[in-house]
Image (cartoon, helix red, strand yellow):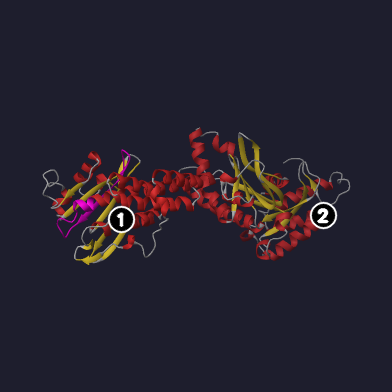
Amino acid sequence: MGYELIGDLFIEMDQDDLAIFSFRQARYYYSRYGMLAKVKSLETRHPDIAAEDLRLSSGSQAENLSVSETSTGRTTSGNLDYMSVIKASQAISGEIMLEKLFEKMLRVLLENAGATKVTLLEFRKNEWMEAATLVISEGREEFNMLNVNLLESRDLPQTVVQYTIRLREPVVLQFGDADDKFKQDAYIVRTNPKSILCLPIMQQDMVLGVIYLENNLTINTFTQDRVTLLQTLAAQIAISLQNSHYLEHMEHLYHSTERFIPKKFLEIINRENIEDVGLGDSAKREITVLFNDIRSFTTLTENRTPEEAFAFINRYWKFMAPIIRKYDGYIDHYQGDAILAIFANKPQDAVLAAINMMKALGDFNKVQAEHHDVAISMGIGLSTGPAMLGIIGEEERQVSGLISDVANTAARVEGLNTFYGSRILLSDATARDLPATLKKLFRKVDKVRLKGKTQITEIYEYIEWEDALKVPIADYLELFSKAFNTYEQGNFKEAEKLFSQCLTLNEKDRTAQSLQLRCLEFMHSKVPVNWDGAFTLSRK
């Protein structure tokens, strides 16, 4: 498309040979990408181009730009030929990444204009900003990306640039301060440049940007021929800028959609991007679900305004969510004070995330103190099992989600933290395949039928009270395990004594305390029929 537009420009300039050259380039690329309608349109408008497909190569006329190094930097010898500008246009149009495009663009401008400095300005969010600059100093080039407001810049003549923006026409100064309109400009007075060219980048009637060129060593650098050719080059720059910004916008859009449809989820259902996703797309996977809940959230928020509660919960998730991503998980959904996160690779990823979330809670509570706010506590439950993950809903409203009992189990397991006084609990399905180095951080604390379920779930607790022990932890865990095995066998009287010994060694062991009370209840009431070691829970 760029070649076609340049060809139209050459037609207006009565440069027919160069126009045909450009149209042949356009025809070649349209053919290459299967745009046959554009090929037919070009051949209808310009029959001469059908005679030959001409493609620029290393031996083509387009490389005949004669460049000589002088004390002014890079300058062209004699009049610049149009084929060289087409070659430069091709170099610019071949780049779409913004920073690389800017660097290549400024280098092409510098080489073709005989300048020692070139700066690109863009109109962003209702402000003119310096976007990039390339300077030759002592024979070396220095390129920098910028983000400087024009009104705050000390590296450009404000009056010259503003004049170009306002009148939408080039400004050429051969002596810098020779023109009365600009001679008082602070930059020109300070630096005394020998030659200046300020050129608008136009797209129809809109100024997309400004090119500022300067030579601080030589006068009469920017001849009329050079200005004309650089205006031709600016037409291609306008197209490349728009294409690059469009690509940047699309990438930003895709990143934005990932906040609603996680990239990890797309990988699981084998889709490249959100555009490929359709209702019913799904995959069956073994997953680990992490359910995290803030304690006493209702009490925490009842004396806050909605705005304060909103800020509080977002401050909390800002600490926790990155840890989930770090360990290869993603957040399926938020439930106000709770989250449900999915780990589709290894259970240990979820367990490590849970442990590090608890460590991060300490950092969060320090921030709470800085906000003169209360410290909070939380619980985490994990379970592992098969799940269907996919797009659920109907044509007008769709979400990513999972259909599986494993999420319900994780939530029920988390709820048991209040019973044991623990902070992290695992189901046996999660604990089963953990590596030994990680599994030793947990102990089996119960065997239950969760509310509404018939299957038995073994519960494992994260050990966080080692410093409170009066004996080596291995000895204590052996005593607790003996007490629990005795309890499982239905010998509640002996188990109660053993749990009592545990509490003598660690009075903070809420789990041992809870199991001791359970043994006392069974001792003074009827033992459950068909006791198999599993306690049936009557609440979530």
Q: Is-magenta flag for residue 220?
A: yes
Which x, y percent locates residue 508? 66, 53
- Tell which tag, 1 or 2, sits nearer the viewer: 1
Q: Which secondary structure, mark 1?
A: helix
Q: Earlier in the sequence, mark 1 or mark 2?
A: 1
**375 or 61, nearer to the observer:** 61
* Rendered residue at 42%/45% (across/down): 42
Q: Quick one: 332 or 107, which is closer to the camera?
A: 107
Q: Name the residue: 20% across, 48% down.
A: 157
Residue 488's label in the rendered image is 2
Bounds of the magenta segment:
202-227
Image coordinates for residue 511, horizontal then vertical, percent: 71, 52
Q: Where does residue 273 sit, x and y in percent of width and height?
A: 56, 48
> How many tags in the picture?
2
CA neighbours of label 2 inside 10 A, class few (<14), some (14 to 19), many (20+): some
Q: Secondary structure at mark 2?
A: helix
Q: Position of residue 100 (x, y in %)?
A: 38, 57
Q: Is residue 476 above or below residue 343?
A: below
Q: Which mark is residue 85?
A: 1
| Amino acid marked by disc 1 | Val
Q: Is residue 310 left or right of residue 464?
A: left
